[in-house]
Image (cartoon, rainbow, N blue to C red):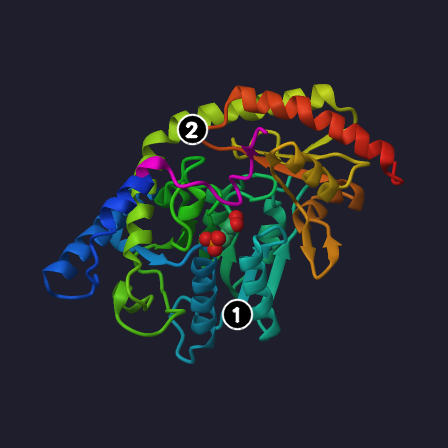
Amino acid sequence: MKKLYMDYNATTPLREEVRAAIIEDLVVYGNASSMHADGREARARVEAARGRVGELLGVPAKTIIFTSGGSESNNTVFETMRRLASDKQGMPLTKGRRGFITTAIEHPCVLNSAKYLESLGFKVTFLSVDQYGKIRMEELKRALNEETLLVSVMMANNEIGTIQDIREIAAMTKTAGAWMHTDAVQAVGKVPVTAPDLGVDYLTMSAHKIYGPKGIGALYIREKAPLFPLIHGGHQEDGMRAGTYNNIGILGFGKAAELAKQDLASYGREMGELRKRLRDGLLAATPNIKINGHPEDVLPNTLNVSFPGAEGESILLSMDLAGIEASTGSACASGSLEPSHVLIATGAGPELAHGSIRFSMGMGITQADVDYIIETVPPIISRLRSMSTVV
Ligand SMILES: Cc1ncc(COP(=O)(O)O)c(C=O)c1O
């Protein structure tokens, strides 16, 4: 049976070249903090990888710290802000500021960090989004004030692929004197992400979304922006993130970053063509469906479709039987099926939110693969709709 992985936003396979680089590096066992020759060799490789990750973002290596992934990078930014706000002296720029602004459609690692701060008594504003998943600049403008400490807005949404105008958001944030963070986990490697152009103070990325290994990520910290550690211990990463260097993960990340930079233009072109083919094919072959996300400012690999009258989990299972691996926008939490918080925020009713499927494509997907989906999915939808009591 054909097996077709269409869930690249959840994670990506290791690229062949990354796997080869990791295998080559497995023999380097030194602790990158040791002063002897083996340690120095390991450290040199870690620093070379840091340089490559920096190059992908257009920033110096020294502005990058390695973490265990996107979740940790995001948590580190929120913890830094909590410490700043709790600091009796306060930095001159942040004194008295205790307000946070984020959006209703962030990844749970940002949403729950923000909710945690809210539970500690900080003021948190969750910006709403329009029908395409974009925040409204007027709402941001109204929310920003002299108490705002941090604005955290994701660059690209993992479920619907909508890309925010981070440069404009950062400019407004800086005018208000607050720090600006963007979770760029889904944007990096898919669209150009140049941190200095965006004007952000902090930017989060994760290796396993760009064909690198799992359990390794990075945080970009603009020079002079404050940072407090989330993990205390030794003085790795200039004392900003303790723990023995994850050499294998870091080196794999470095290779993945190098390749992502090299392939960015061709990736964008190829994914854009596949996405258009899939979108047009599904629209032509299936009545009454809705494409979610922004029509233009959208990740080239991500197509989120609602199939009203068919239930997301049932579509997923039927597709899985036909060898197609995708995902729903909804999560199954403790036995109850929660509709996607992202689609609900765009104003989708429960039926559209429950019947949504995210196809996220990546390197190796061909036009023939897309055609297989266009042939296979419409009959699944009509069968499920005919069985459904909702229609
Ligand atoms: C937008 C976004 N942020 C953060 C994360 C978390 O990254 P990690 O899996 O490296 O912790 C993900 C992963 O799904 C994501 O899509």
Q: Earlier in the sequence, mark 1 or mark 2?
A: 1
Residues rendered magenta in the picture: 1-17
Q: Where is residue 263 in the image (x, y as percent from the top left)?
A: 36, 30
- Residue at 43% x, 80% y is 88
Please name the residue that numbered disc 2 is placed on.
Answer: 267
Disc 1 residue type (three-letter)? Arg
- The quadrant in which the C terminus is found is top right
The quadrant where residue 277 appears = top right
Residue 308 to residue 26: above or below: above
Q: Looking at the picture, tell me which residue is in the foreground, 214 or 224.
A: 214
Who is closer to the viewer here, 319 or 124? 319
Q: Residue at x 30, y 53 (%)?
A: 248
Q: Do the residues labelled 1 and 2 touch (CB within 8 Å)?
A: no
Q: Position of residue 187 (x, y in %)?
A: 47, 41
Residue 353 appears in the rendering:
no
* Residue at the limit of the structure toward the bottom, as seen here: 88
Spot occupied by residue 40 in the image (x, y as percentages of width and height): 14, 59
Residue at horizontal 53 percent and vertical 33 percent from the top: 361
Q: In which quarter of the image is the N terminus?
A: top right
Circle 2 Cα neighbour tier, 10 Å, few/some/many (<14 / 14–19 / ≥20): many
Q: Residue 98 carries which label?
A: 1
Alpha carbons under labels 1 and 2: distance apart = 41 Å
- Above or below, 178 relative to 329: below
Q: Looking at this view, is 372 or 330 the one in front?
A: 372
**For discs 1 and 2, the disc positioned in front in the rendered view:** 2
Tell me the amino acid under the disc marked 2: Tyr
Residue 358 picture location, percent across and down: 62, 38
When asked about the image quadrant of residue 385, the answer is: top right
Q: Using residue 188 as the reference point, say whether residue 327 is left or right of it.
A: right
Q: Name the residue rendered at 74%, 30% in the picture.
A: 380
